Amino acid sequence: MSLQAYKGVWVFIEQRDGVIAPVSLELLGAGRKLADKRNVPLAGILIGDEVGKLAPVVIEYGADIVYLYDDPIYHDYRTESFMKAVIDCVEKHKPEIFLYGATSTGKDLASAVATDLATGLTADTTMLDVDVETGLLEASRPAFGGNIMATILCKKHRPQMATVRPKVMKALAPDKKRTGGIIAESLYIREEDLRTKVLKIVREASDKVRLDEADIIVAGGKGLGGKEGFEMISQFAKLIGASVGASRDAVEAGWMDHHHQVGQTGVTVTPKIYFAIGISGAIQHIVGMQNSGMIIAINKDPNAAIFQSCHYGIVGDAFEIVPLLTQCFAQVLQ
Ligand code: FAD
């Protein structure tokens, strides 16, 4: 099959309990740009049970077409059933580019599809572009410990696939006036042919922080010296309604749980305000928070790299500055 036979940009629309994952909306925004550059349509592939009502939302967020697989067999996510639907759709309509959220579902599905179709997949992409002439997807991601950005091409196979980290791309504002086509697809899958059965879904009762949804994050690093330092910033965070983040070194020291880690091997965050306190500013940390609205760094070393990546920098000892900030905010917020 010639590569020219493949046209259009696709986004896998991840949904759970009838709610579209934010990353899918972000990918529609990113996919729209790629599709416009190539002058090809943008499509969403939506798979689930009773999910037809979500198709117009996919169009509002930028898609021209929605391929809809709506059947009870897709009630719960299972690699096999979803993969069969995706492969059926790819074989019928042949997209040139296919994007998935780098969530556990997106990563699981994309890798299974890529293996079956024998095509390339770039994981955990943080930047996307396309060569207008050749149609080659330029999927960039940190490599070699985050010291360089690698741009990965898939020259010989189609579709060109990538998983993209949540919160890195921007969703378009929904436009109720946008129009598009909804194509109902069907594929006969017998329950008895599927090897996985979902017996019960048990929701984890958890007090895990959702850093990726926080508006304000107060993050601490090795410079906080220990758990007491984190207690100090947690107090400040609580006062201003912020979540607490941490560098990997602070997590590895056992001062904070891994769920708080921001960065390449932690969470990517985009709060309105990000305080980086006692954090040196290693590239692996910066890639996880650089898209924050405002970054305020506190570090006692005036040459710390973090000062190259912040909007406001305070050179000083965190143990002097943070109590002062807490005191000031307490007065204002009284
Ligand atoms: P340090 O680099 O030790 O910096 C401490 C800072 O605190 C210094 O700048 C110091 O001047 C300042 N300081 C000291 N005392 C005070 C004080 N009293 N008041 C104010 N400032 C003070 N890192 C991450 O954060 N997230 C990741 O996801 C991540 N992933 C990685 C993946 C790979 C493959 C690799 C190789 C590394 C990764 N790292 C990650 C680690 C990263 O390279 C750095 O080692 C780490 O971010 C450094 O943490 P830090 O800034 O807390 O500590």
Image (cartoon, rainbow, N blue to C red):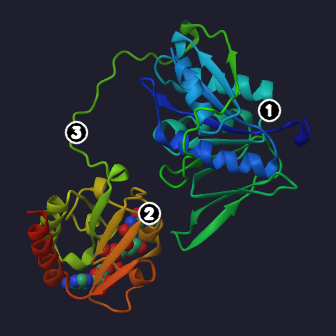
Q: Is residue 276 above or below residue 257?
A: below
Q: Position of residue 98 (x, y in %)?
A: 69, 41
Taking the spot 54% from the left edge, 74% from the top edge, the residue there is 147
Image quarter hosting the N terminus: top right
Q: Position of residue 108 (x, y in %)?
A: 53, 37
Residue marked by disc 3: 206
Spot the residue most to the front: 177
Q: Residue 94's mark?
A: 1
Q: Is residue 303 visible?
A: yes
Q: Is residue 242 above or below residue 227?
A: above
Q: Is residue 185 left or right of residue 46?
A: right
Q: CA distance from mark 3 to mark 1?
A: 41 Å
Q: Position of residue 72 (x, y in %)?
A: 51, 10
Label 1 element class: loop
Q: Is mark 2 within 8 Å of ligand 1?
A: yes
Residue marked by disc 2: 288
Mark 3 neighbour density, 10 Å: few (under 14) some (14–19) many (20 or more): few
Q: Is residue 77 above or below residue 291?
A: above
Q: Quadrant of residue 284?
A: bottom left
Q: Are marks 1 and 2 in contact (CB under 8 Å)?
A: no
Q: CA distance from mark 1 to mark 2?
A: 34 Å
Ligand 1 located in image quadrant: bottom left
